[in-house]
Amino acid sequence: MKRKLIFFSVLVLCMGTATTAKSQVLLSLIFGDKLNNEDNLFGIHMDYSWNQLSGVEADKNMRTFNFGLFYTHKWDNNLHLNIEMLAKYQRGAAGIPAYDLDDPRLNSIYADTDVTRKISYLSLPVTMRYAYKGAYFVELGPQASFRTKARDIFETELTQGDASLDVDIRDQVQRIEMGYVTGIGMYIDKERFNALGLRFQGGFSDVMKDIDGKQKNSQIAIYANLPIGRGKMKTK
């Protein structure tokens, strides 16, 4: 019980204050070894993702590296609860055609460029895992995300050099996004305490406020969960 109270205290602290990767590393180093035991695992989540946004004309995937904390609890040999708090988490799309910037000079510079839309979130995916033979698992669960930043990035090449323009679009993006996570993975190492996996993360709610039709984030990610301190959770 004491370990669970420590975990949820850390989680609340992270959601309120952890806006950089450095704070998450510090919290992991402080609490990681105390939370790791035969039934629990705590540490760092990392993933590399390919992102798209439906309902928006975009012909490229936006690639991002995401970072956060994870907590895994083993109910029994087959059922595991996994909770993550992602403080560095981005979604969006690339290859969006340039639009009117309400400035003739800027339009003349960026009229023929593509736009990358980057939306930053604090995100909380929660999944139930069903493990097979202690090593392989499938997972499914909800994901709630809180938008912190959103920007459109215009980039072009000029004779004088490269030029870029960031446009703040936070007022055009919904504050809360609800979605889901599904994936497959495996535990590795001698005691199988690290997790590697492949996920699809989709959206239930619209992302943009003033665009007709459905616009939902989708993401394919390769991820690794790495315990801090000595991982002690045994999966079989």
Image (tube, helix red, strand yellow):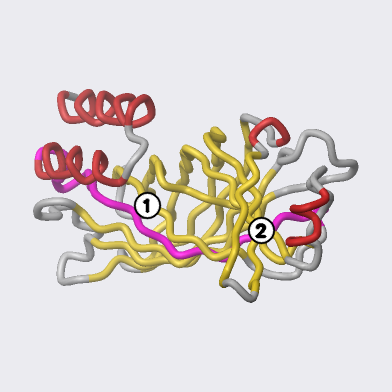
Magenta stretch in the rendered image: 34-56
Residue 79, percent from left and from top? 38, 49
Query: Which residue type does callout 2 highlight?
Result: Phe
* Quadrant placement of the N terminus: top left
Name the one closer to the observer, 107 or 210. Answer: 107
Q: Residue at x 29, y 25 (%)?
A: 13
Check disc 2: other Cα within 10 Å, few if <14, some if 14-19, many if 20+: many
Please tell me whether residue 51 is drawn above or below residue 19 in the rendered image: below
Task: Label 2: state its secondary structure.
Answer: strand
* Quadrant placement of the C terminus: bottom left
* Residue 22 left/right relative to 56: left
Q: Residue at x 62, y 43 (%)?
A: 179
Residue, disc 2: 154
**Earlier-in-chain disc, 2 versus 1:** 1
What kind of secondary structure does the magenta stretch mostly adopt? strand
Residue 22, percent from left and from top? 24, 44
Query: Which residue type does callout 1 highlight?
Result: Phe
Instruction: Find out whether residue 58 is within the magenta segment.
Output: no
